[in-house]
Every structure is written in structure tokens, then in C-alpha cells.
Image (cartoon, rainbow, N blue to C red):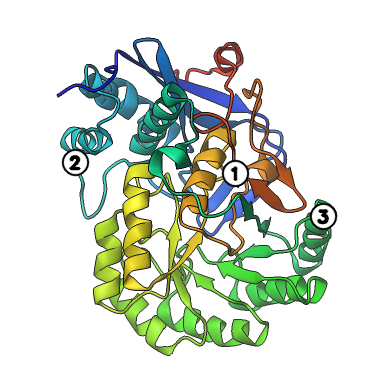
């Protein structure tokens, strides 16, 4: 069965983007000011139509590296997709799983996400409509963003809040698990003192044990924190169930939810309050939509997050979050930490702490391919 063009080319680029600020999580550094941030861009072409996707290698957060993402796409996913119809997103995901199979959960989600997002962009561009129109689902026109506070001392945390406020932000997400418990609490307390009425939540990126997380949750509740995100290792299902039963704060899961079936397991075990939607972590927009719909159908609260994406990834997340009406602040923080130097025209507009959901065809971001090629680096060179 054939409706429309078939994929005839998949190109993979590793690009070095300017880094604006340092950024760290409990696993280590994510971005270092003055050191380029590597992003993998993918261009999928089909009989003259094309679309772009992005992957964000962060070894401090997950196992996929720039090298592994590049080779997974270039040597495995791309050849497997050639000749496939661009409309068949479900079929593309089946090919992904046959080509790079899963272990305990999804396999190589960042690499798969880049190609899946590029297919969405291609289909939207070919039809002349935004991605949300393809889905028939767009509930909001703008998404509230959160300013990230990460790695600072308590004194520096207050300065970070002031910097975010000056940029128009009124919500904050604090990375914890980077210090001992007392220092983590002091950093959160400094943020609360500097922003007494702002929405505030914390993200441990798997940094605590059950006992430490429970001690911290009780203190964080006194500071008006609204959500405790991924306090335990992703696969500590028993611990997360125990924590959720005793925590005074809602427990949100991010790294634990690679695939929609992961969410189903946590729902059945009553080990989740909030599901974090994250496009790259879940292998792209196709599976992310399934995860979000499952959360809605199960009555699980939805929130949103990103992976320090540049503007292609930022736009993909905005379309997903708008489709599911996520109104809580989200940490789509790429603009805070890097410059999308490959953008050559239309892109995401951010004003007063809100990102406007793009209205152009596909993702609504214009990529300058000449700029991409000029920024490209050989991540496989030794």
C-alpha cells in the first residue's frame, strides 16, 4: 500500500553548537561554557520532500553518546528505512525495534527519536501544515517554561533566579543530587527565598537512595516544592513504590519511562504520581504520544521536559506538549545553555517565559543546511 513518497535518503550530521552556560546534573556535566555542545541532526528526504530531527547526546544522563547515536542512525536505522513510505510512522517504529532491539526497556531511544521527529517534520512540510494539525490535536498555543538552577552554591542559586527573572521567567526547576543532602536543601531554600511565590520543583536525576529521598521530601514540602522528580534510579521499581507511598510530595518519573509499557507497569504498581513527557527519551513523537495518551487515560498527571535540545528538538517538544495541553511549567532549557547556530529562518519564539508553539509547516523551524555542514564535526575521528 502506497500513499505519497518513499524515503530515499537519510543524512546524519554531528554539529558543534556554541555553549552559553555551565550545566550539570547528578550524573555529571551536561554543558560546559566555552566548550561546544554536540548535537546530532538528521535529514530525511523523500522524492524532494524533507524533514529534520535532532538527538542530544548526554552521557551524564543516559548511555547514548554522540558516536553511538551517529553510527546507530547512519549504519543501522537509515539503511533499514530506505524505500519505506513516509506516512507509515507505526511501521517505522516497528523497523526501529527490529533493527535495534530493546533490552529491559526501549533500545537507543535518542537515535530513534531523531529519525522519528524528522519524519514528522517531513510529513508536515509536505502537507503544508504544522505537526499538531497532522495529529488533529493542539490544545494550547504557548507553553510556560522554567528556568533551571543547577550546580550552584546557595548564594549562586539566588543569582541564577535573578538572572531567570530578568529574562522573564517566573518558574524554577532545581537540580539536586549534586551535593550532600544539607547543601541540596540549602540550594533549594535559597531559590525559594529569592522566588517566594514561584512554581518550584526539584529533579534528582536518580541521585538518591529511598531513605535519603524520603528525608529530603519532607524538608522540600516545607519549602513549597510541588514535585519531586526522579529521586531514585530508573529501575528501582520497589523503591519508587515505597517512596511514593510515604512521600509528602508527588513523585514524578522521567528516566524510568522510556517506553509506554514502562508507564503501564508503574501505574499498575501504584508507583507514580506524575509522568514526564520527554520526546527523545521515549524514542520520538510517535511513542511519546502513546505515553501521553496512556497517562491521560489512567488519570496520571502529565508534565513536560527536554534534553537541553537545540531549536529542532525544542519545537518537537512544544508540539507534543501543546497537543496534550500541558500547562505546568516545563524545562525546555536549550535556549538557556546553547545557541542553535544552524537556524536560518523561522524558529521558536520565546517571550516573557513562554514559548509559542510554532505555526509553520512541520516543526516550524527553518534549518540552514549550509550552516549545518559548516558546523559539522567528525565525532568518529580519533
- Residue 101's disc is 2
Q: Position of residue 27 (x, y in %)?
A: 50, 55
Quick one: label 2 or label 1, which is nearer the N terminus? 2
Q: CA distance from mark 2 to mark 3?
A: 43 Å
Which of the 4 image quarters holds residue 15? Answer: top right
Q: CA distance from mark 2 to mark 1?
A: 33 Å
Query: Which of the image's four quarters has the N terminus?
Result: top left
**SS at badge 2:** loop
Q: Do the residues bearing badges 2 and 1 touch, measured as CB atoms within 8 Å?
A: no
Quick one: label 2 or label 3, which is nearer the N terminus? 2
Q: Is residue 287 visible?
A: yes
Circle 3 or circle 1, nearest the eye: 1
Is residue 44 placed above or below 133 in the rendered structure? above
Please report the residue visible at 40 percent of the width from the left and 10 percent of the height from the top. 48
Nearer to me, 13 or 207: 13
**SS at badge 1:** loop
Packing grade of label 3 (10 A; few <14, some 14-19, many >=20) is few
Residue carrying label 1: 357
Question: In this image, 169 relative to 300: left or right?
Answer: right
Nearer to me, 50 or 201: 50
Circle 2 or circle 1, nearest the eye: 1
Q: Do the residues bearing badges 2 and 3 touch, measured as CB atoms within 8 Å?
A: no
Quick one: label 3 or label 1, which is nearer the N terminus? 3
Q: Position of residue 303 (x, y in %)?
A: 50, 63
Please report the residue visible at 56 percent of the width from the left and 41 percent of the height from the top. 314
Query: Which of the image's four quarters has the C terminus?
Result: top left
**SS at badge 3:** helix
Packing grade of label 2 (10 A; few <14, some 14-19, many >=20) is few
Please report the residue visible at 66 percent of the width from the left and 37 percent of the height from the top. 338
Q: Position of residue 320 (x, y in %)?
A: 46, 48
Q: Is residue 307 visible?
A: no
Residue carrying label 3: 163
Amino acid at each position: 500500500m502506497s500513499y505519497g513518497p518513499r524515503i530515499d535518503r537519510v543524512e546524519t550530521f554531528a554539529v558543534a553548537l556554541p555553549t552559553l552556560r555551565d550545566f550539570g546534573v547528578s550524573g555529571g556535566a551536561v554543558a560546559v561554557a566555552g566548550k561546544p555542545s554536540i548535537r546530532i541532526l538528521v535529514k530525511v528526504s523523500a522524492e524532494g520532500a524533507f524533514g529534520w530531527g535532532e538527538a542530544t547526546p548526554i552521557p551524564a544522563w543516559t548511555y547514548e553518546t554522540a558516536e553511538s547515536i551517529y553510527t546507530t542512525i547512519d549504519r543501522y536505522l537509515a539503511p533499514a528505512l530506505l524505500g519505506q513510505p513516509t506516512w507509515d510512522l507505526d511501521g517505522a517504529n516497528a523497523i526501529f525495534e527490529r533493527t535495534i532491539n530493546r533490552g529491559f526497556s526501549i533500545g537507543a531511544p535518542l537515535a530513534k527519536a531523531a529519525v522519528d521527529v524528522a519524519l514528522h517534520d517531513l510529513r508536515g512540510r509536505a502537507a503544508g501544515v504544522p505537526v499538531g494539525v497532522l495529529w488533529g490535536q493542539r490544545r494550547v498555543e504557548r507553553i510556560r517554561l522554567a528556568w533551571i538552577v543547577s550546580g550552584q552554591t546557595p548564594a549562586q542559586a539566588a543569582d541564577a533566579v535573578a538572572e531567570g527573572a530578568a529574562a522573564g521567567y517566573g518558574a524554577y526547576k532545581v537540580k539536586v543530587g549534586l551535593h550532600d543532602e544539607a547543601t541540596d536543601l540549602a540550594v533549594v531554600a535559597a531559590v525559594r527565598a529569592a522566588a517566594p511565590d514561584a512554581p518550584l520543583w526539584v529533579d534528582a536525576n536518580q541521585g538518591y537512595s529511598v531513605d535519603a529521598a524520603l528525608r529530603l521530601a519532607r524538608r522540600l514540602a516545607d519549602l513549597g516544592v510541588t514535585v519531586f522528580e526522579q529521586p531514585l534510579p530508573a529501575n528501582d521499581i520497589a523503591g519508587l513504590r515505597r517512596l511514593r507511598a510515604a512521600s509528602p510530595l508527588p513523585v514524578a518519573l522521567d528516566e524510568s519511562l522510556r517506553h509506554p509499557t514502562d508507564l503501564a507497569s508503574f501505574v499498575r504498581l501504584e508507583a507514580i504520581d506524575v509522568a514526564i513527557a520527554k520526546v527523545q527519551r521515549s524514542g520520538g513523537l510517535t511513542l511519546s504520544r502513546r505515553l501521553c495518551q496512556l497517562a491521560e487515560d489512567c488519570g496520571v498527571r502529565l508534565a513536560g521536559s527536554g534534553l537541553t535540545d537545540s531549536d529542532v528538538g525544542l519545537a518537537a517538544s512544544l508540539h507534543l506538549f501543546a497537543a496534550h495541553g500541558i500547562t505546568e511549567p516545563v524545562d525546555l532549557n536549550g535556549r538557556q545553555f546553547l545557541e542553535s547556530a544552524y537556524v536560518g529562518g523561522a524558529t521558536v519564539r520565546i517571550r516573557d517565559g513562554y514559548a509559542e508553539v510554532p505555526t509553520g509547516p512541520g516543526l516550524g523551524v527553518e534549518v540552514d543546511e549550509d550552516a549545518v555542514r559548516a558546523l559539522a564535526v567528525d565525532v568518529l575521528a580519533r
